[in-house]
Image (cartoon, rainbow, N blue to C red):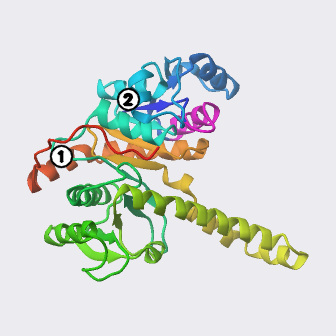
Amino acid sequence: MKVILDAMGGDNAPLEIVKGAIEAKKEYGIDIILVGDEDQIRNILKNENAEPNSFEIVNTTQVIMNNESPTNAIRNKKDSSMVVGLKMLKQDKGDAFISAGSTGALIAGGTLLVGRIKGILRPGLAPIIPSKKGPFMLIDAGANAECKPQYVLQFAMMSEIYMKKVLKKDSPTVGLVNIGEEEEKGTQFTRDCYKLLKESDINFKGNVEARDIPFGAADIIVCDGYAGNIILKTYEGAAEVIFSIMKEKIMSSSRAKLGGLLLKPVFKEFRKEYDYTEYGGAVLLGTKKAVIKAHGNSKAKAIKNAIRQAKLFIESDVVNNISNGIEKRFILENKEDNEPDNVD
């Protein structure tokens, strides 16, 4: 098993990316290919007292930035760490690719360079998110700002396979994001999605309002990428606000500090449960190989867990299971172009 890692992608690259690779290598014994500026990578390995020969390093001279057009960057920056890494994945030089770099570029590159599984109309970005009842999968979290109902149905089917194979959920429930629980609520798009999901063989529980998502409304939450990205960012922001307010209140007085000290184990457990670094990254479901988007602000721990997630993805043979599952259910004629609607 080999994981290809974009060493130059993300706010804390390359230092935290390489440190995460070192930790993952120690814990999981996975072969890791580091793609990026070789001199910088070797210096970090040396400073961290890591054996340089334990990693394969592929030198690149370019980096894709977040403010660049995703499709143009993929086409024009051919010696970027992301493009080189994705092409290596396509050429079977690795089993998974991970990047904390530009989300839009990774989605475009995963679709254009790695390619879609036969029958899949659009890949969907699918992070694992904590809730009161345990983790759930949100899809689409930003790969396709505009969707057709058929895309949403496939998102649900792919996520169902992932949840069964990777998270060992026997019969994961699926909820459709809407402004009300009633079947007739929402736009024509959501009503059409509801109809397809209801007629399918997935465990569809109906519409889910956004306020119910944090309480664990379903194991899989499906929607278009526009709504999904808003839900994801709101979730992240709300978690940070809660942690920030709790810290301010605890530090506000001696009495509060004492109470905080007594509750420290509880707060620690709570923060761990709602910490994105514990869950790795968002999987791009629907591509021919495993493509994982780590959080842009990832540090070593998050990268290590993204590598763990890639390991589970590969061991669970998710791609072949999706391919077989889609073929059994239906193969849709795909006459659409290969460029996704990206959220930059």
Q: Amino acid at mark 1?
A: Ser
Residue at horizontal 42 percent and vertical 22 percent from the top: 76
Measured in 3D between alpha carbons, the distance from the residue under mark 2 to the one under mark 1, in whole angstroms, is 20 Å
> Foreground: 211 or 96?
211
Residue tagged 1: 323
Local packing at callout 2 (Cα closer than 10 Å; few below 14, some 14-19, many 20+) is: many
Instruction: Give the left or right position of residue 154, taking residue 297 as reference.
Output: left
Residue at horizontal 66 percent and vertical 66 percent from the top: 241
Is the Cβ of the residue at disc 2 closer than 8 Å to that at disc 1?
no
Badge 2 or badge 1: first in the primary sequence: 2
Looking at the rendered structure, the secondary structure element under dot 2 is: helix
Report the magenta stretch's main SS.
helix
Instruction: Give the left or right position of residue 45, taking residue 308 as reference.
Output: right
Local packing at callout 1 (Cα closer than 10 Å; few below 14, some 14-19, many 20+) is: many
Q: Does residue 268 sit above or below 186 in this rendering?
A: above
Residue 317's quadrant in the figure? top left
Q: Which residues are magenta?
A: 10-27
Looking at the rendered structure, the secondary structure element under dot 1 is: helix
Q: Amino acid at mark 2?
A: Leu
- Magenta segment: does it hold 180? no
Residue 140 visible in this rendered orientation of the protein:
no
Residue 168 visible in this rendered orientation of the protein:
yes
Q: Position of residue 326 (x, y in %)?
A: 15, 51
Residue at horizontal 41 percent and vertical 61 percent from the top: 227
Residue tagged 2: 86
